[in-house]
Image (tube, rainbow, N blue to C red):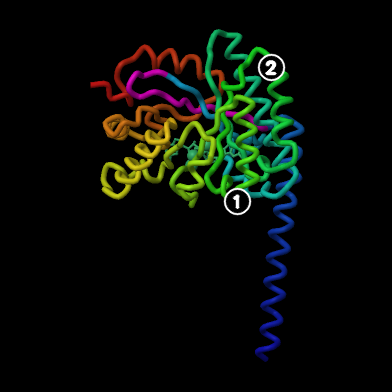
Amino acid sequence: LAKQRGRNCVQVFDASVEASLRQKQELLRRLAQALEQGEFVLHFQPKVDMLERRPVGAEALLRWNHPEEGLRPPADFLPALEGNELEIALGEWVIRTALEQVASWRAAGLDLPVAVNISARHLLKANFVADLKAMLDEHPDITPDRLELEIVESTAITDMNAALEVLTACRALGVQLALDDFGTGYASLAYFRRLPVDLLKIDRSFVRDMLSDADDRAIVLSVVHLAQAFDRRVIAEGVETTDHAQALIEIGCRLGQGYGIARPMPAAHIPGWIAWYSATDDGAAGRG
Ligand code: C2E
Ligand code: MG
Ligand code: MG
Ligand code: MG
């Protein structure tokens, strides 16, 4: 009897695995179609100098503009792409589209560096650097330092030597490099000092509770000191309130990004937002 029940369990398990595999296949098919039909869009979230109330860049964040369900966040579809060829095709679309946006803002008189998120698989694929260079070459009017690549710490340590080589070559092209979600991975300090990154992004989980949790505040402070000691820039993610902005400025972290400053928005809203932000004196800047 037990054996029979066991067999049934295996069958149930198989059936549900099969169902979820089918679902994933279907989602992948829809995502390929979405890329072909232009359903992906980039939204942009400003990065600012909170002390001077000055924009320093914008992060491109991927959205799927689903014809029936509306705008869907990356968490809804990026996991399904992991390990699939489409992940790279979409990653290349993101870089190309971000560069086009930099160029079009520039033509309109707005000089704004844009950051894109790069997946591990994309970064470590063959010819990543040559392909990136080709995309940059299509925009001779844009200097490469207007493009910033955000890499999560875990990507940088998956295959350390390969990552080091690629990142060093990207730096040589002149693009900026940022270590995203910093503090959540396990990069050793010895490895960190070899990483050619320009910017550390303090993970928003530490920023969120830094006002109430002494440990989180200590972590934020340590990352700021680490950045200063190694002559890297540092930015706080997830700045949700004026109090956060104020505390960060006091700690020595002037750069911030978060809902308390601006939510991610369509590209068309960026120039108006910047004009407003630069002209006003209140809000998240916490300028005393
Ligand atoms: P990330 O790179 O760390 O991006 C920041 C995420 O935090 C964004 O979520 C942003 O909307 C959200 N965020 C910004 N400020 C706040 C805040 O004050 N509070 C809170 N709670 N959240 C805030 P989003 O757009 O859903 O993206 C999630 C993640 O998806 C990104 O995390 C990034 O890892 C990934 N992602 C987004 N776009 C791309 C892309 O084009 N390519 C790849 N490979 N990954 C992407
Ligand atoms: Mg990012
Ligand atoms: Mg991040
Ligand atoms: Mg994050």
Residue at horizontal 60%, vertical 34%?
62
Secondary structure at numbered mark 1: helix
Q: Residues within 10 Å of mark 1 (few under 14, many from 20)?
A: some
Circle count: 2
Q: Which residue is mark 2?
A: 139
Magenta stretch secondary structure, dominant: strand
Screen quadrant of the N terminus:
bottom right
102 or 196: which is nearer to us? 196
What label does residue 180 carry, if any?
none
Q: Quadrant of residue 255?
A: top left
Q: Which residue is mark 1?
A: 158
Residue 10 x, y percent position in the rendering: 69, 76
On screen, residue 29 versus residue 5, left or right, reads: right
| Mark 2 vs 1, N-terminal side | 2
Residue 65 x, y percent position in the rendering: 63, 33
Secondary structure at numbered mark 2: loop
On screen, residue 244 versus residue 60, left or right, reads: left
Q: Which residues are magenta?
A: 40-54
Query: Is 104 placed above or below 95 here?
Result: above
Q: For the view shown, which residue lies furthest in the bottom direction?
A: 1
Q: Is residue 258 visible?
A: no
Q: Amino acid at mark 1?
A: Thr
Query: Is 266 placed above or below 24 here?
Result: above
